[in-house]
Amino acid sequence: MPRTERGYRCSSCGWTTVAYVGRCPGCQAWNTLEPFAEAPRGTAASRRPGAAAPAASLVRLGDVEGDTAERHATAIPEFDRVLGGGIVPGSLILVGGDPGIGKSTLMLQAAASLARGGLRVACICGEESPRQVRMRAERLGVADAPVDLIADPSLDAALAAAESAGVDVLVVDSIQSVTVEGLESRAGGPAQLAEAGARLLAFAKGTGTATLVTGHVTKGGEVAGPKLLEHLVDVVLYFESAEGGVLRLLRAVKNRFGATDELGLFEMTGAGLQSVENASAAFLAPHAPGASGCAITAVIEGSRPLAVEVQALAVPSALAAPRRIAAGIEPARLHLLLAVLARRGGIPAGALDIVASVSGGLRLRDTSADLAICLALASAIHDRPLPAGTAFLGELALSGAVRPVHQASRRLAELARLGLRGAVVPAGTPAIEGLQLTRVASLADALERVGLSGLPVRAVPHHDALQQPQRGEQADQ
Ligand code: TYD
Ligand code: MG
């Protein structure tokens, strides 16, 4: 009977040996050798499946230990919200975003808050010197928090220090700035990132340390950026700024311990990031009374309803193919809604340049804002304002039918809380206190209720609106 082969195999290049060595002579990587034991070739095919391989054990689902570990709450309300209630011990969390968006600021604030709460917290600061971190901490008013700094650029040395200090939470700022020794490629390169990610994962799982890692989104080529690590980590959060202003959106795109699509809202102030809890107020632009092209709606972002304003502008175009510019609205959706508005609402955009955007820099991701977008467009095309204090909810079918939206009552409750007086909603929407509902079955119906139907088609300078070929339209984002 042929003997089973045993030995060690390099997990990165596949080199094998019978005796363990720390560094693989094949690819020079450290600590990549793993033990293996396998039957010689030729025997596997003739073997009954599962007969000779050591059997894995079965565990009944109900017997598996549940999530008994307490989460570490950061006491930063919007950060905890996005994390699903706090940081789970042993989890690996990636915080990505453009340079300068506020990743280091948030990490330092969270680290200080956790350390003040009695946890042992260390930061590997690869981006900045301890002196710079100290200056930032002073600005943030957290310089007295018992946070340990590790300034060694070698990841292995830093992790060894963190492990021997027995930290509960480790912050790595940033993954692009630490190096894994023994790899040929430069710091921040794909091979370095993948290896550093794997080491951090092994560290987090092996020691039970909650590990927060920041990563820059590389402009254009995202391969070498945090995208490379998304499959590996437990939680992926992305930081975005809304319209380049002071608002910062922290979005969970993956969360093994909570809901994805959760949105955290911050404001960048002179003293760091402040949680914005009344989110709707931040997104509702101060209203210019009597402005045309503005329609309020409510969307569901993660677990909360948010009121936003859709804004549209229509101006005579100087181009043969008028422009359609959308910010926060899918260009394809804008085109579709313009087609519905022309055909079902009798309001063609024709030779007008159309600009549509969403207040606060939010991206609309569901179709519940269709009616609001269409009415904002209609209002802009006719240059007549919509009724003040009224919001619009509803998805539009190509037939012009207004379809119901999910979680309508939560959206309406938020609109009522903000002091709106009425809402135009799909037929069948249940009544809600404090809001006068106007139920409509179709777009034409809605246009009539707001006084935008039966108006003469707005004179357009170049072409007859309905005969204008729409093929050459350009969608800009
Ligand atoms: P930072 O956290 O360094 O960004 P990242 O780590 O994502 O690259 O944030 C830097 C920006 O934030 C910088 O432009 C200055 C600004 N900022 C404030 O406005 N207030 C503050 O209290 C701090 C610390 C930074
Ligand atoms: Mg930084």
Image: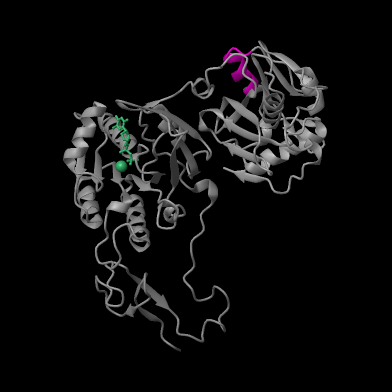
Residue pictured at 54% horizontal, 22% vertical: 284
Q: In this view, does 363 lie to the left or right of 387?
A: left
Q: Tell me residue 183's x, y (percent).
A: 28, 66
Residue found 49% across the figure and 34% down from its top: 263
Given residues 95 and 311, the one toward you in this image is: 311
Q: Residue 12's image quarter?
A: bottom left
Q: Is residue 61 above or below residue 433?
A: below
Closer to the camera in the image, 468 or 299: 468
Residue 427 in view (yes/no): no
Write down the region rendered in magenta: 411-420
Q: Residue placed at 27% from the left, 72% from the top?
A: 28
Query: Residue at position x 66%, y 10% from top?
Result: 434
The N terminus - image quarter: bottom left
Magenta residues, dominant SS class: helix
Instruction: Report whether 123 appears left or right of 268.
Output: left
In the displayed structure, does residue 465 sit left or right of residue 9? right
Horizontal and vertical percent position of residue 120: 24, 38
Give how far across and how far down residue 442 sits, in percent. Answer: 81, 28
Q: Does the magenta stretch include residue 331?
A: no
- Does residue 202 appear in the picture of this structure? yes
**Quadrant of the rendered image containing residue 311:** top right
Count every numbered label the image shows and give the total. Answer: 0
Q: In which quarter of the image is the C terminus?
A: top right
Q: Which of 222 and 156 is in front in this view?
A: 222
Depth check: give the residue in front, 325 or 9. 325
Q: Position of residue 319 (x, y in %)?
A: 65, 42
